[in-house]
Amino acid sequence: MVVRGTLVAVLGAGTMGVGIAITVARAGYSVLLADVSWERARAGVQAADAYLSESVRRGKLDSQQRLAISARVQPSAEIAAMRDAAVVIEAIPEDLDLKAHTLRTVEAVCANDVLFHTNTSTLPVTAIAGRMRRPGNVVGTHYCNPAPLMSLVEVAPAWQTSAVALERTEDFLRSLGKEPIVLKDTPGLLTNFLLVPFENDCVRALEAGWGTVEELDLAVTTGAGFPMGVFRLLDIVGLDVHRAVSLSLYRQLRNPRFAPPPLIERMVAAGELGRKAGRGFYRYGVEGFE
Ligand SMILES: NC(=O)c1ccc[n+]([C@@H]2O[C@H](COP(=O)([O-])OP(=O)(O)OC[C@H]3O[C@@H](n4cnc5c(N)ncnc54)[C@H](O)[C@@H]3O)[C@@H](O)[C@H]2O)c1
């Protein structure tokens, strides 16, 4: 069991790391939000604060709750600071070598029973675990974006994951108010295996001139009943992240519907990455809110 109040380290202070840090701190844990530099980690904490302030403005939290949650999230760029963590949650870019190398470095300073959770969208959790000294402690936990709002977490045990680590992971996720579903360690699990080809089809329809961004999003929401348009969703995900996820799935599955469309390549090259860049398929204000 992971005791409430204990330290949870979140690696990567980007879109997912910030959302996961908020989720974990809200449930009463102390969070170390770590990135490659103190400035990036600090920017992640500021993004978490901005999200929490917006929640107060919308009446979802009161100011006291906001202050208490904010106080539990601290920035860090020091691997050594993670030595007391009970859980390490990795949310760094979708690159097997980077994830495995980073987790192995952190593992060297942590206790023997620390849980390592990888938020990979597409990479084999079994391959990440295979690079660790204690592979039994590694579990794939794929949060949906935005992590503070979406209740589903896809759980993918590696072939090496111990029964105890899996049980502790499910308990931990429930303590966050999440709904874990345990799946096989397959490319993209369920959500990305189903969603990514559909998203790429929408981008290809846009490229082919079958409709505008607004028209295609309208078709997806009011016609197909999705809660959000695909282009709005891609802007939230981040087009660089979508590109990496598509490419990884395409390499594993060899199905062309997973390959990133040329328009995505061009937009990433131009830095039009979506909300986090202020510009993607839509335009955004400084704080990422429209
Ligand atoms: N964006 C989504 O909708 C989404 C949803 C579910 C899962 N994921 C997965 O979550 C992971 C992170 O995605 P994201 O959207 O948050 O990416 P992001 O680009 O927004 O953030 C990644 C962060 O990791 C940091 N980083 C890079 N190397 C690091 C290291 N060695 N140590 C610590 N920090 C490091 C970067 O500086 C950056 O701040 C990816 O594996 C992605 O596939 C993304």
Image (cartoon, rainbow, N blue to C red):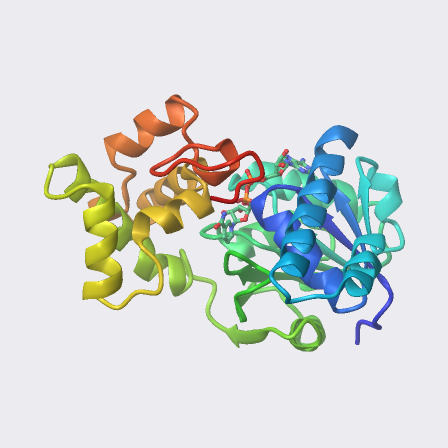
Figure label count: 0
Residue at the spot 26% in from the left edge and 68% down from the top edge = 225
Q: In this image, 138 relative to 153: left or right?
A: right
Classify the position of the N terminus by image quarter: bottom right
Q: Nearer the viewer, residue 28 or 32?
A: 28
Residue at the spot 88% in from the left edge and 41% down from the top edge = 80
Q: Is residue 117 visible?
A: no
> Which residue is the extreme one toward the top?
270
Residue 43 lies, in percent from the top left, at 70, 36
On the rendering, which quadrant does ligand 1 occupy? top right
Q: In this image, 234 relative to 74: left or right?
A: left
Taking 132 as reference, is 14 above or below it? above
The quarter of the displayed image where residue 211 is located: top left
Residue 181 lies, in percent from the top left, at 51, 75
Taking 213 as reference, is 54 above or below it? below
Q: Is residue 243 visible?
A: yes
Q: In this image, 122 relative to 221: left or right?
A: right
Residue 100 lies, in percent from the top left, at 63, 43
Taking 267 as reference, is 172 above or below it? below
Residue at the spot 25% in from the left edge and 30% down from the top edge = 262
The quarter of the displayed image where residue 52 is located: bottom right
Q: Nearer the viewer, residue 183 or 203?
A: 203
Q: In this image, 145 relative to 162: left or right?
A: left
